[in-house]
Amino acid sequence: MTIISPKPEWLRRRLPTSPEYEKMRKLMQQNCLHTVCQEACCPNQWECFSEKTATFLIMGPVCTRNCRFCAVAYGKPADPDPDEPTRVAAAAKSLGLTYVVITSVTRDDLLDGGATGFAKTIEAVRQAMPDAGIEVLIPDFQGNPAALKTVLQSDPTVLNHNIETVPRLYPLVRPQAEYARSLNLLAESTSLFPHIPVKSGMMLGMGETEDEIFAVLKALRAHGCSRLTLGQYLQPTQNHLKVERYVPPQEFDRWRQTAMEMGFIRPTCGPFVRSSYHAGIIHYADSYRTKRH
């Protein structure tokens, strides 16, 4: 049996509570919606919910892949709900969001991998909230370029696809994914729609070396990725991949400096950082900086 190692002090935090957290939780429940925050056991969900921020998880809470790092349920998903895009848009508007993050489980059972679901949700949110920023965190669509184009044609504010780990660990961490396929998706996104910023992220602490991390960051930049998140992998249950190392905050600070020197725009690095952590704050800070200069 795998034993989860005790967390160091820098990974201990108080859980914020507020009326906004309960409001967010009830709204999701009443509208039959899911968030990746809850399904993936994100350590930031209390903070983000309290700040009226969430990442909507579309096309159900069951994934067709069984990655060893992820707490999202694995199995045979139900058919996509055609009314879900409208409910997501209504919930986002009800919460007064200015930046909406949308992700999904991997739907290898669908011909387009769920790309149409992303496009319809983007369109519904934009119709309900014309001025809101919309970031999408997409799966790899099994390398289907037409599926990727379907999402990009809906003109999201930011396109995010996580590389997750170094190539050597792919067979262990995410055996149904391919490192090269994910890099090609990022490059294709930049080539097709260069005005849409491309983002990616990694989890550290699964056994990767510093040289391997640096090589991945270099590859991400070479494939058009301009935004980056680096966070600490946390073992969600005893059945998941164990944590090999807890990365101290100062090491994340060093990686942030390295990433900036490599040309990443406002890289977000830290033990609690996840794909969409403070995504809206970072995006609008970038927009403000660009307008000023």
Image: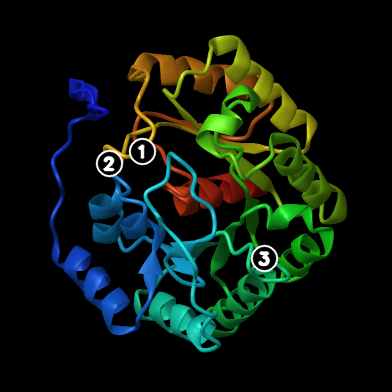
Q: Is residue 291 above or below residue 111?
A: above
Between marks 1 and 3 in the image, the one whose residue lies nearer the viewer: 1
Query: Left of 174 or right of it: where is 49?
Result: left
Examine the image and state in which quarter residue 166 appears. top right
Residue 63: mark: none
Q: Which residue is mark 1?
A: 240
Examine the image and state in which quarter residue 95 appears. bottom left
What is the spatial separation of the Cα atoms under label 2 and label 3, in whole angstroms? 27 Å
- Taking the view exactly as shown, the residue that stands out farthest to the right is 191
The kind of residue on which mark 1 rests is His
Q: Check if mark 1's residue and mark 3's residue have beta carbons within 8 Å.
A: no
Q: Check if mark 1's residue and mark 2's residue have beta carbons within 8 Å.
A: yes
Task: Look at 59% across and 64% down and name the residue there.
Answer: 107
Q: Which residue is mark 2?
A: 237
Q: Give the image location of residue 186, x and y in percent.
A: 74, 44
Residue 98 visible to the viewer: no
The kind of residue on which mark 3 rests is Gly
The kind of residue on which mark 2 rests is Thr
What is the spatial separation of the Cα atoms under label 1 and label 2, in whole angstroms? 6 Å
Which structural element holds mark 1?
loop
Q: Give the image location of residue 27, x and y in percent.
A: 28, 78
Q: Give the image location of residue 192, x and y in percent.
A: 86, 55
Q: Is residue 8 above or below residue 234?
A: above
Residue 113: mark: 3
Say which of 72 and 191 sits in front.
72
Task: Look at 33% across and 34% down and name the residue there.
Answer: 234
The disc, 2 or 3, on the residue closer to the chain's N-terminal end is 3
Q: Is residue 229 above or below residue 166?
A: below
- In which quadrant will I find the C terminus? top right
Q: Check if mark 2's residue and mark 3's residue have beta carbons within 8 Å.
A: no
What is the spatial separation of the Cα atoms under label 1 and label 3, in whole angstroms? 25 Å
